[in-house]
Image: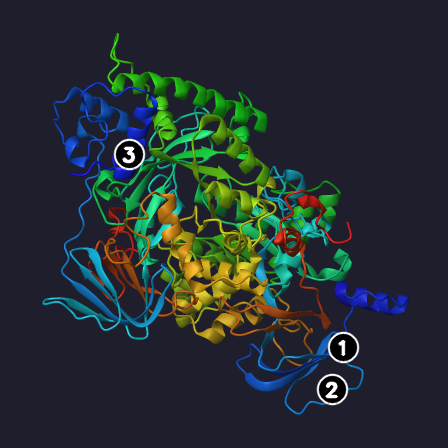
Amino acid sequence: MADRRSSSRAASLMLAAFMAAGCASGGSTPAAGPDASVRGEADPAEADRQLLNGTPNGAWESSYEPLASGPVLIRGGTVMTAAGEEIEGGDVLLVDGRIESVGVGLDAPDGATVIEATGRFVTPGIIDTHSHLGVYPSPGVEGMGEGNEATNPVTAEVWAEHGVWPQDPGFWRALAGGVTTLQSLPGSANLIGGRGVTLKLVPGRGATDMMFPDAPMGLKMACGENPKRVYASRGPSTRMGNVAGYREAFIRAAKYRERWDRWLAGDRQGDRPDRDLELETLAEVLRGNILIQNHCYRADDMLTMLELSHEFGFSIRSFHHATEAYKIRDRLAEENVAASVWVDWWGFKMEALDGIPQNLALLTDAGARAILHTDSGLEIQILNQNAARAMYAGRSAGIEVTRDQALRWITIHPAWALGIEEETGSLEAGKAGDVVVWSGDPFSVYSRADQVFIDGAVVYDRSRTEGNPSSDFELGILPDSGLGGGR
Amino acid sequence: MNTWWLAILLALLAGSPSIAVGQDLAVTGGTVHTATGEVLEGATVLIRDGIITAVGHDIEVPAGVPTVDATGRVVTPGLIDATTSLGLVEVGMVSSTVDTRLDGDPVRAAFDVVDGINPRSVLIPVNRAAGLTTVLSAPGGGLIAGQAAIIDLAGSSVDEMIVRPRAAMVASYSAGAAGGARGGASLRLREVLDDARFWRENQAAFSAGGTRDLAASRLDLEALGPVLDGETPLVVGVHRASDIESVLRIADEYGLDLVISGGEEAWLVADRIAAAGVPVLLKPLTNSPGGFDRLGSRFDNAMMLERAGVDVIIGSFNSHNARWLLQEAGNAVRFGLPWDVALRAVTLAPAQALGIGDRYGSLEPGKVGNLVVWTGDPFELSTRAEAVVIRGAVTSLDHRQLELFRRYRELDEERPAFKRPGF
């Protein structure tokens, strides 16, 4: 079973970290591949590495298994690849859960299920970088809120996956909207809110059953009004206090990392360093293995966070909400930081006052990596519509936005922000068979997801009355209960 | 006579050039959806002094009347959203800019939002540019939140904008509305309505201090008079099917003109709502079982209600983004509501439910000249409003967000704040 926190990219970053520490001795292989992380591994250095990865003794690993599937040929649709092409009368062939090929006139292998998509549209599965499904589930009542460990401004030690409720009915509504992958994040009460988790929308009994294999983890950070409001009485109560809080935490993390990296590189004088869950997370951020997902609205706040990242030598993977990202789109492009934004939420608080519907178009125009996110159990069901609204808002203001670019806002760009862009997010041979067949143009308000494939298996089919995922919670309450999403 | 007509009269007497006074306009050549079921290709809508005088073909446009060429375009009545607080809120979390609610006792029937409406709210032009011409601006909170006003989204003073003050009484029925139990909400509603009736019949005695204590202040009880008379609609936010039935019972007992708002589980009691002749004001994009009072929430609520014969009204339930109203309506169509019913649900249906159906909501002679020229199907995401007409005047489609866009269209790294033309 793959260790979801030791992807090859992460491993190579770790190797670089050890080399930077200047210690090549020790006899272990720091960049050991996934096979080395099996449960019961005896090598003490490997055990240390698992610790560092957050998977001691193989615990907390993804237990996701794709649903069984045979070969599938989706034939004759308008295939929107999110890789630069829109193929009329195109085919997508899925074999062994992967995209075998994308093109025109593909042959169906023996035993393949053929889906006639003439008049319909085919896209990659949609991905949301910003969800609280699972941690703020429905019903949103007493006993169910898991998103904010609002007891301390820095809680890098908490993990969203420990709060994810796999029975959240919202998952299956999102699936019926064409979503195949989402990141469930802690909330924004804290400066550093904890680790986020990337999930595949396939039912499971526990959160690990839904975890996207090999996906790096996220770290939720928050700028601006929320932390200073939540902690007004004890601090931080200002943006100044916020920034001091991040810096203080990363100073401790840098020291912790140094101590552990020395130990892991074989310099084993004295006792093994103690584990500290909070600093373990932040040290992994500094090593580049955990991706920062930073709630931050205002342009000046984002620039402040870029300075912070320079001070400590880490990267911010994506700003989130970023209502003013358009004001600094050149800087975001330069620094290779994505912006996960809404189409046109605005005005609900001061830092959201300047949100405009052309945000995505302006970011795209400047070559920044623009992402449409939701932060909403409703909007995650209409990401296709909202991508269309943002595309047309740009066009009507005179900014040329192509359909492929708009599709990327909800597919390959969010995949990049989650570190899974090699695996999913576009219709290209070799990638996971995460595919949506739409009843019509996904950029029309009237279109619906007809079928949603994850790893080559039909997880949702609008035409069937049984077999679509649904939550235990919805059983036995109302007529038609248990139908899951899409109604 | 309502305030707007009074304003026109005063303006005429004063020779005021105010744009809120009705103007002349001809909109020619468009595909006109009247919202009464008619679709007229290549038709003209003629507006004189802010009132529609003719809709159809072969209409002669008098000399001097400005013309909007709507050839190849779609023309509909101006959109009406009965679920906003436009003018009453500027920044949600800045309490000094929020005039939607009074604190204290859950019964605030006398609270009238009109004086809180700010005609210069930046939210108004943002939403007008998306085709909204008329809204109910409503209070919130408590059991009886207060009285909502209908405004047209043009004019520099409330007097100009107002269509009907105190147009609806707004209430909310839930476990938390009064005392922490549903029975408490029912109890308090009945008590207040009883006392409103009692007060009206015993005003002299009340003034002389000769009555028992009453359940609300004199002003609250007085404000409920038109509600008891069935003249002012009572818009009740209510969600669970059984709660809807409770509210229907109370409305029946007191002879109220009820409008159900929210109504996530209304489909479960659709026949009963239809039999009572009560309209349902709903947000089609609602399908999460977010609370135990809406476990039955689903996207095709509107369709099922309509099939049962219920008058469906679509609302945005938003202020900053009341402009999402059309996406809401489009999604109702996606989930089975007929297109023409969806159009009616954002035009004539809210006008009728709010008691202004004789003057608003459709393109017919005698009605106020509020209309929108669209580049295509108004529900489609690619469509935008090309002209928004209020009382015959073509309104500006510019707003603060477009100013921000223009300022940042080209980035000047040196001095971004100095980009503004004329600075």
Discs 1 and 3 share one subunit: no
Relative to B359, say whether A406 is above or below. above
Identity, as a three-letter code, of the amino acid under mark 1: Asp
Extreme-top residue of the structure: A270
Q: Chain of mark 3?
A: A
Contact between marks 1 and 3 (CB within 8 A): the answer is no
Extreme-left residue of the structure: A110
Across and down, in percent, residue B261 comes to 50, 57
Relative to A395, say whether B242 is above or below. above
Q: Chain of mark 2?
A: B
Circle 3 crowding by C-alpha within 10 Å: few under 14, some 14–19, many from 20: some
Locate residue A65 relative to residue B176 in the image: left or right.
left
Q: Which mark is residue B61?
A: 2
Residue occupying the point 53% across, 27% down:
A242
Circle 1 crowding by C-alpha within 10 Å: few under 14, some 14–19, many from 20: many
Q: Which mark is residue A12?
A: 3
The span from disc 2 to disc 1 (Cα, nearest Å) is 10 Å
Locate residue A146 relative to residue B47 in the image: left or right.
left
Query: In this view of the protein, can residue B418 be seen by the observer?
Result: yes
Q: Which mark is residue B24?
A: 1
Where on the picture, by quarter, is residue A95?
Answer: bottom left
